[in-house]
Image: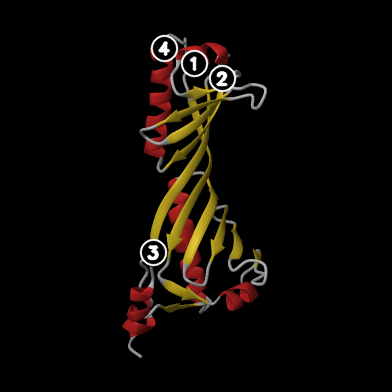
Amino acid sequence: MSSIENDIAYKPIVNIENIVATVTLDQQLDLYAMERSVPNVEYDPDQFPGLIFRLESPKVTSLIFKSGKMVVTGAKSTEELIKAVKRIIRTIKKYNIDITGKPKIQIQNIVASANLHVHVNLDKAAYILENNMYEPEQFPGLIFRMDDPKVVLLIFSSGKMVITGAKREDEVYKAVKNIYEKLKQLDCIKPIEESEEELEF
């Protein structure tokens, strides 16, 4: 076997699916005034203490609390998240709701998906890897807790993965590269034949 065939090409595709962040404004907010003035918001304090604000572009949802805290979900990048927060605050101000606090944004969790384009031998990986959980009768994926970066990976035999727990986008890419290198080193992966790739939908 030639060295080219022996060396599995590293060609993962990584997609950021959702960024969950908290935003602190350091001021109290009048949610009743916001509900009366700002269009397309939902506020029912008997059901939930936060006001729901949906932004169309970028497509994010924000839960706004009277403490001045917000939870923003749905952004696909850090840049999109910052743009969304600015747009939410601009929209609220436009309807004469006074916002004096400077928003402090903190990413709590990044959820991403990846495809390594290889077959993963999960039985072997489960036997060798530390900090993993694999019960194929219950669930087809292997759950691996990585220490550096501190994320949780859900790995499937198809080479597809879900990554959660990252606080920065670069941690997602680092985690995918690290798990690929580790699985390759442990001889837990093999290439997918081109004919098989064509069959994937």
In 3D space, how far apart are the residues under numbered discs 4 and 1 (Cα atoms)? Answer: 17 Å
Bin the neighbour count of mark 4 within 10 Å (Cα to Cα): few under 14, some 14-19, many 20 and up.
some
Tell me if I can see residue 62 in this picture: yes
Residue at 66% across, 27% down: 47
Q: Quadrant of residue 116?
A: bottom left
Foreground: 88 or 11? 88
In 3D space, how far apart are the residues under numbered discs 3 and 2 (Cα atoms)? Answer: 40 Å
Residue 149, label in figure: none
Residue 174 location, x and y as percent? 45, 56
Mark 2 in CB contact with mark 1 (< 8 angstroms): yes
| Amino acid on which disc 2 is placed | Gly
On screen, residue 22 versus residue 15, left or right, reads right
- Residue annotated with mark 3: 12
Bin the neighbour count of mark 1 within 10 Å (Cα to Cα): few under 14, some 14-19, many 20 and up.
few
Q: Earlier in the sequence, mark 3 or mark 1?
A: 3
Element on which disc 1 rests: loop
Q: Is residue 51 above or below residue 13?
A: above
Tell me if I can see residue 27 in this picture: no
In 3D space, how far apart are the residues under numbered discs 3 and 1 (Cα atoms)? Answer: 41 Å
In 3D space, how far apart are the residues under numbered discs 4 and 2 (Cα atoms)? Answer: 17 Å
- Residue annotated with mark 4: 95
Mark 4 in CB contact with mark 3 (< 8 angstroms): no
- Residue annotated with mark 1: 101
Q: Earlier in the sequence, mark 4 or mark 2?
A: 2
Q: Is residue 61 above or below residue 95?
A: below
Residue at 58% across, 66% down: 141
